[in-house]
Amino acid sequence: MEHILELNQVSKSFPKSGFLLDKVSFSLPYGAIMGFVGENGAGKTTTIGCILNTLLKDSGTIRLFGKEMSDGDTGIREKIGVVYDGDNFPGYLTAGQLAKIMSGLYSSWDDDLFLQYLENFHLSGKQKIKSYSKGMTMKLAIAAALSHHPQLLILDEATSGLDPVMRDDILDILLDFVQDEKHSILLSSHITSDLEKVADYITFIYKGSLYLTASKNDIMYNYAVMRCKESQFRALDKADILAYRRRDYQTDVLVSDKKKMQRKYKDIVIDSVSVDEIMVLLVKGERV
Amino acid sequence: MKGLLKNNFYGILSGAKVFLIFMLLLGICVTMMEKNSFMVIVYALLGIIGFSINGIACLRNESSSNWNKYKLTAPVKRAEIVRSYFLSHLIWLLAGMLFAGMEITLSILLHGSPFDRNIDVFYIFVAGIGISLFTVSLFFPLSYSGSAEKNQVFLIISLIGGIGIFVKLVDLLNTLFDSDSSMTTFQLILSGSIIIICSLFLFILSYWVTVGIFKRKEV
């Protein structure tokens, strides 16, 4: 399988804060959406910073379109669209002025497409960006990111702060974008319901370490939670346990092979698991 | 580069408009004054230095958003981003010189030359260009090595430093030409040219230093 983005053992430390992004590895295939999940401060933005070279990684390799991107590789950046959380553009600009700037930055900038997005999103080209609402600024950023025909979209918490209807519209646009099998999206978010709707792959990061990277189908069909009584929990094979969390009368145990567990532990209730539940179990649960 | 220059232009525009109005009003007042060489000198220096300094002050306003980070994800090299700032500064310096030139011309046309010697006009431009280039040469490396919140402080330090370098250089040249009385026209042209060359040299050196700093900077 060809990958548009590959991270291999990427590390980045911040001595002042003590934060360490620790040997993160994952791959995003062409034509896919990867949900990059983790709580605030988990290392999502740091990882994206390393991918985009706004942060300088300490070690590891990052390949975009099969190549490590240096400052001089402007051709690679031509194929990447980026949306950050919050204000992407200076408030003193209007969308019209932004288009003029972007057309001077990207050789493949499509003014007609940008105007079409502005119309679809009901954004005025003459209004100063500082007078936009948060939802409007995010829509503008998405319009700008898509209007130079990128192959890879990287969105850092781009749907946070949007109302459910707007989020749904944006997710539809993202789904439409990956209809072309040469297009991919890395979508960082902590809104797991969005990711469950659109993502093909889920990568979960916690305190700078990668906890899980798997296809959504794998998670939906193979990952499960076993609801164990204390005696059942004690009898479990430790190798089967990814994480567990004790509750009042039962212990929830996260496992990665539902069918095998069903065969192996016939008297234990095994439920399918949501991304949200996996996240909670991995973060709040304990490891064996 | 075109996109970056447009970006810098829009970043400066609102500040430049206010300064332009101020300069127009002040220009009317100065033009109405008869043979007031001091005011003409102040106006010309204010025009040359003010426009270019206003340029760098506004340019750094964009740091209040993610735009600085966003630009690094665009298909431009870091050196090009720095170069665009230096080029923008030169453009605004030219605009300031044009303004100063127009005011001096207008003043001479209406009231005759307010200066004792014609070479004084040349030296006003030397002072304006020198202080402006020295200031920006100090500002950009400082600005890129520190955080955006300190930009106003860096600007004040750079302006004081720029004036200081200019004054010291003039003092050195005066000593060099051993001029207890006034310098000859040739000496003034020569010392003015030395100041311009020094300021351009520092400007170019500052560009390379800033590029070096920015290439290692994390945003």
Image (cartoon, coloured by chain):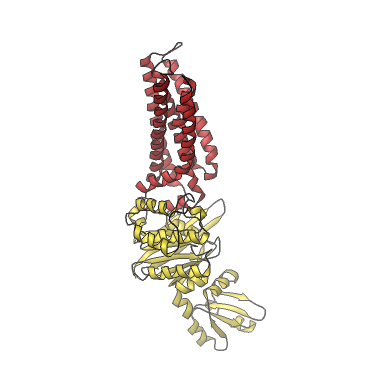
Residue B148 coordinates in the image, percent (x, y): 52, 45
Q: Is residue B49 above or below residue A209?
A: above
Tell which residue pokes out farthest to the right in this image: A248
Query: Residue drawn at (48%, 76%), measured in percent from left and top?
Result: A219
Q: Nearer the viewer, residue A247 or B176?
A: B176
Q: Is residue A16 left or right of residue B115?
A: right
- Counting the numbered discs, the total is 0
Does residue A74 appear in the picture of this structure? yes
Does residue B140 appear in the picture of this structure? no
Q: Is residue A138 left or right of residue A283?
A: left
Q: Nearer the viewer, residue A259 or B103?
A: B103
- Quarter of the rendering containing residue B206: top left
Indicate the quadrant containing the N terminus of chain A: top left, top right, bottom left or bottom right: bottom left
Tell which residue pokes out farthest to the top in this image: B181
Residue B150 coordinates in the image, percent (x, y): 54, 41
Q: Nearer the viewer, residue A8 or A136?
A: A136
- Quarter of the rendering containing residue B184: top left
Chain letter for yellow, please.
A
Residue B59 coordinates in the image, percent (x, y): 46, 43
Indicate the quadrant containing the C terminus of chain A: top left, top right, bottom left or bottom right: bottom right
Chain letter for red, please.
B
Query: Residue drawn at (47%, 27%), measured in percent from left and top?
Result: B43
Q: Is residue B195 above or below residue A175?
A: above
Q: Nearer the viewer, residue B124 or A84?
A: B124
Residue A42 coordinates in the image, percent (x, y): 54, 62
